[in-house]
Image: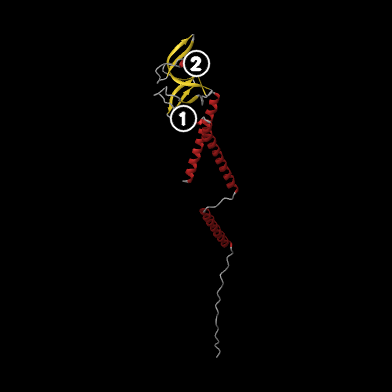
Amino acid sequence: MKKALKIAGSVLAWILLIFALLITIMVFTSDKNNGVPSLFGRMPMTVESASMEPTFKEGDLIISKEIDDINDLKVDDVISFWTNEIVEGQNVVNTHRIVEIKDDNGTKAFVTKGDNNENNDSYLVYPSKIVGKWTGTRLGGVGKILKFLKTKTGFLVCILIPMAIFFLFELFKLIMVIVQMKQPAKLTENDEEEIKKRAIEEYLAEQQKLKENQPQQDPPQQTQQQTSTDNAE
């Protein structure tokens, strides 16, 4: 039971470590990409408004992917793109649906609209502004967690501190293993019984060998005393 709990604890610790590393990568990549995290060509983003309800809701986590060929986009695709809005020093990314594709002086441009909005967006979206295409993946409410993890407090409490505890725990286990290797091995009760049993068997075998090698002696001869009777008259 203790061994199973120990294994389960180790597995859980490694899962948390991998999760922490993924979040760390996303946080650093988002800083380099104007606030948009990227992981293996996938971009997890938090929905900040209700403009796309009921497709996805505010606080959801959606996944967009990089676009290899802009010509593959078509009407009804949902795309993430940069807007001209700036919030807290960063450009704002919208994720809306393509409702029309236009040719603007030889350049492809997209007309977009939020599913929950009455009117189309007031600007055209050009290929250079497109971040990615929504994959259809939506995790309800998880976006709030990701948004918190990207803050300094969330990163410290949920990432740095657990990682520090994990490494300290692994260091403690390594030290204990080294200490145990230097100490003489402790015998269990079964081991002690087995050693006693072997010692007795070896002793009896040695006694048997000595008995077999001992020279045999002739048995003592019995003498009969003969009595002589005098018939002297």
Residue pointed to by mark 1: 144
Decide if residue 205 is on the left or right side of residue 102: right
As drawn, 8 above or below 194: above
- Farthest-out residue, bottom: 233
Residue type indicated by callout 2: Pro
Q: How far apart in space, not on screen, are marks 1 and 2 (Cα)?
A: 29 Å
Q: Quadrant of the C terminus?
A: bottom right
As drawn, 178 above or below 193: above
Residue type indicated by callout 1: Lys
Q: Position of residue 81 (x, y in %)?
A: 48, 19
In terms of depth relative to the viewer, which is nearer, 75 or 229? 75
Helix, strand or loop at mark 2: helix
Given this view, does label 1 or label 2 mark the residue nearer the observer? 1
Q: Position of residue 176 (x, y in %)?
A: 57, 45
Circle nearer the N terminus (1, 2): 2
Residue depicted at x 51% and y 16%: 128
Q: Are marks 1 and 2 in contact (CB under 8 Å)?
A: no
Q: What crowding class fits label 1: few (fewer than 14 Cα within 10 Å), some (14-19), or many (20 or more)?
A: some
Q: Position of residue 45 (x, y in %)?
A: 48, 25
Decide if residue 201 is on the left or right side of residue 61: right
- Farthest-out residue, top: 105
What's the coloring here? secondary structure
Helix, strand or loop at mark 1: helix
Disc assigned to residue 51: none
Residue depicted at x 51% and y 38%: 13
Residue pointed to by mark 2: 127
In terms of depth relative to the viewer, which is nearer, 101 or 68? 101
In terms of depth relative to the viewer, which is nearer, 199 or 116? 116
- Farthest-out residue, right: 182
